[in-house]
Amino acid sequence: MVAAAGLHDSAVRHIMGTDRMGRLHTMIPDTTAGTIRLEDAGAIMGGQTVWRHVTGSFRPGSMTAIAGANGTGKSTLLRAILGEVPLAHGTVTRGGLGPRDFGYLPQARIIDRGFPISVTDMVLGGAWQQTGLFGRADRTVRLRAANALHRVNLDGQAQRMIAALSAGQFQRLLFARLLMTDARVIVLDEPFTALDAPTTQDLLELVCEWHTQGRTIIAVLHDIHQIRTCFPDVVLLHDGQATWGRTPDILTPVILQRAYGGTRDRWADMPS
Amino acid sequence: MSILSVLWDPFASFGFMRRALVASMTLGMGAGPVGVMLQLRRMSLIGDAMSHAILPGAAVGFLLAGGLSLTAMGLGGIVAGLGVALLAGLVSRRTQLAEDASFASFYLTSLALGVLIVSARGSNIDLLHVLFGTILGIDASALCLMGGITTLSIALLSIIWRPLVMECVDPGFMRMTGGRGGIYHMVFLFLVVINLVAGFEALGTLMSVGMMMVPAATARLWTRRLLPMMVLSAATGMAAGLIGLLVSYHYGLAAGPSIILTCSVLYILSLVVSPAGLRAGRHVHETS
């Protein structure tokens, strides 16, 4: 499983256009500041064990995908990392990271898109950690908001209401809001679900940009191809446990078949 | 009779009409914006439930004070309303029941309990007053209470505006990035309760929620921006207060129901003529 790692490494490096991968792949247990570590963690929801005995680290600057079939507890894992779900056993340590070091992208479907709020106000909401919940958004913050909208190609949409945006535009808006948080750790829950190819491409580039800036990225993803090409590390949830490691080692036809079912050929034929 | 005297005389001639006018305007100003927020949070039913939940508290106040005492009944109402809000929230977090289902159970219990308490000790007239209000019998101290509640309500709403809006649109983002959205939810429920208590003396427990909901629904048909929506909701409530009182005076109708029905007429008119109303067809469902 380990033999092919070097080859995949260079493939990943080629796509990312960066040489940071080698450092990120060091297998030394890391307890430094900024590392999120799960130690024999387990979660129970509604009396059912979701996953247990999960051990692993998200090092500063790492980029990890969380994958697995529906109902394997991917979102629960995210929420456990963020401290929103109490663990049934084990621990999660955050290396001194506070709640405000986290930027979070919820699944688009849980947001009330009918709410009468403008694009600008929504983006400014991302800066609440800087402006405070009651403080005024000064010129600097407003300028940053305009830049964030520009970065996600939402120029000229600032005054529209969020209800008037398309699904793709709305997801761009959520990414602009994430830009405003300037968080060290960015947690994405299904960021590319139901988006067209150009939007996915743009937003994926933004995620990679965050990665090269040294931010930690943790994302729930469904697209195995996407994970293979962009995410150096992966946590694959299946049968109540987690297989955690470097993407090329984990997303093999054998393990994928175990996690998702289907025939081994189907997974072997996948473009990687 | 000139138009001016139709509009002016009732208030110039009678003190109780002037007080009723000030009362209904104050209620409209306070309850309108809160109602908009309540609807946007998809909590219309919960507003309805809370108005019923106030009843047993008010009834206990009625018993302790030995009559229709605004202070005692108001305080009792606030305690009971908040109690039911907290309990229902707790039950829905601990069980599989949705919040509206647990609210519905609690408010039916409260309503029955309240009617039982009032009718055990008071007369039928008292019961009618508690249920439907006495807007023409408002005195200066009741006006002070209403004014205070409306002022507090508008002030608090503008202070918690940003976190409340953020918590409404996307509770997950706020919570996960270290914000304590739950607190603002509780402050908001408190605002709902005190506004219902303010309306309760004038319109009764059953109708005070009308001043909160119907103008808000009307305002939502006319604008898609939050601040104008709240201003319009307040203005609609205030206009309905004026028109309702005039209609009730000139045609000898009950004042409280006239005010709420005026709200309803404005709502139906808006449904017909507003851009987001019935003419817009299905589009309304997508944007509301």
Image (spheres, grey):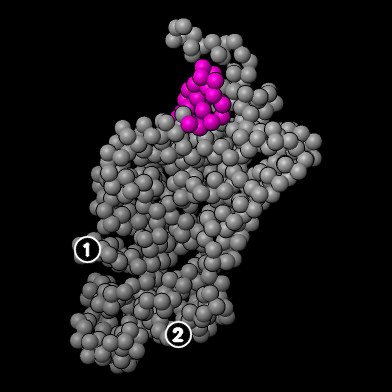
Q: Is residue B250 magenta?
A: yes
> Which x, y percent locates residue B26?
56, 28
Name the amino acid type tagged 2: Gln
Looking at the rendered structure, whether the residues under marks 1 and 2 are on a common chain is answered as yes
Horizontal relation, residue A105 to residue B68: left or right: left
Q: Callout 1: residue from which chain? A: A
In this view, the residue in front, B134 or B232, is: B134
Q: Is residue A210 visible?
A: yes
Q: Residue furthest front?
A: B124
Look at mark 1 in the image and give the residue it sits on.
A196
For mark 1, give the secondary structure: loop
Which label belongs to residue B142? none
> Which x, y percent locates residue A68?
36, 79
- The answer to whether the residue labelled 1 contacts the one labelled 2, judged by CB atoms less than 8 Å apart, is no
Residue B209 figure quarter: top right
> Which x, y percent locates residue B25?
54, 26
Residue A10 figure quarter: bottom left
Name the amino acid type tagged 1: Asp
Look at mark 2 in the image and give the residue it sits on.
A241
Residue at the spot 65% in from the left edge and 25% down from the top edge: B138
> Which x, y percent locates residue A129?
48, 52
Residue at the spot 44% in from the left edge and 46% down from the top edge: B40
Q: Is residue B60 magenta?
A: no
Q: Is residue A35 visible?
A: no
The span shown in magenta is B233-261
Vertical comparison of B176 with B225: above or below: below
For mark 2, give the secondary structure: strand
